[in-house]
């Protein structure tokens, strides 16, 4: 390949990267500025409560086991008013380690950004994580679109 052809290939690659940087970066390389979130401000929990414990346990179980191996995860933890429902979803073409990395980053950030909130969602181009004190399964909800 001549130097001119190599220059053209590099230029095209640079332009594609500028127009679609997310497509070329794995989830672990994306900055958290590429993540979006929304918190429900009308329902909160007390620090140290059973709800907080259930939420922490549930988020830990999502990223610590093989649950994200398929790219989709839903679970609930606890009972009654302290029950937490969650959904995690990754883009279908992501490798399992990138999926887990994206969900893991989301789980840490969502706890800080939506402190003491009983419902929150965080998403990027690679993954989405949502939790709530109300069932999420089979419920169509447009409140968290962008």
Image: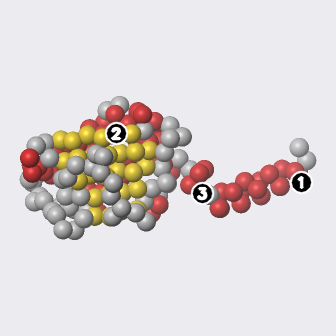
Residue 73 numbered tag: 2
The residue to which callout 1 is attached is 4
Residue 145, quarter of the rendered image: bottom left
What residue do we see at 45% from left, 56% from top?
Answer: 124
Q: Position of residue 4 (x, y in %)?
A: 89, 54
Secondary element at image label 1: helix
Left or right: where 23 falls relative to 11: left
Residue 35 numbered tag: none
| Mark 2 vs mark 1, CA separation in Å | 48 Å
What residue do we see at 18% from left, 41% from top?
Answer: 77
| Mark 3 vs mark 1, CA separation in Å | 25 Å
Q: Is residue 69 visible?
A: yes
The residue to which callout 3 is attached is 21
Whether label 2 touches label 3, CB < 8 Å: no
Q: Is residue 55 visible?
A: no
| Mark 2 vs mark 3, CA separation in Å | 27 Å
Q: Quadrant of the C terminus?
A: bottom left
Left or right: where 8 falls relative to 98: right
Q: Earlier in the sequence, mark 2 or mark 1?
A: 1
């Amino acid at each position: 390949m001549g130097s001119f052809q190599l220059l053209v290939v590099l230029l095209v690659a640079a332009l594609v990267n500028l127009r679609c940087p997310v497509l070329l970066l794995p989830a672990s390389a994306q900055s958290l500025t590429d993540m979006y979130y929304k918190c429900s401000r009308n329902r909160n929990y007390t620090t140290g409560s059973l709800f907080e414990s259930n939420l922490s346990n549930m988020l830990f179980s999502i990223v610590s086991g093989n649950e994200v191996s398929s790219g989709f995860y839903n679970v609930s933890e606890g009972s009654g008013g302290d029950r937490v429902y969650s959904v995690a979803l990754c883009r279908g073409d992501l490798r399992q380690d990138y999926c887990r990395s994206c969900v893991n980053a989301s789980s840490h950030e969502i706890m800080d950004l939506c402190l003491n909130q009983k419902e929150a969602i965080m998403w990027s181009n690679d993954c989405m994580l949502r939790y709530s004190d109300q069932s999420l399964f089979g419920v169509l909800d447009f409140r968290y679109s962008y």
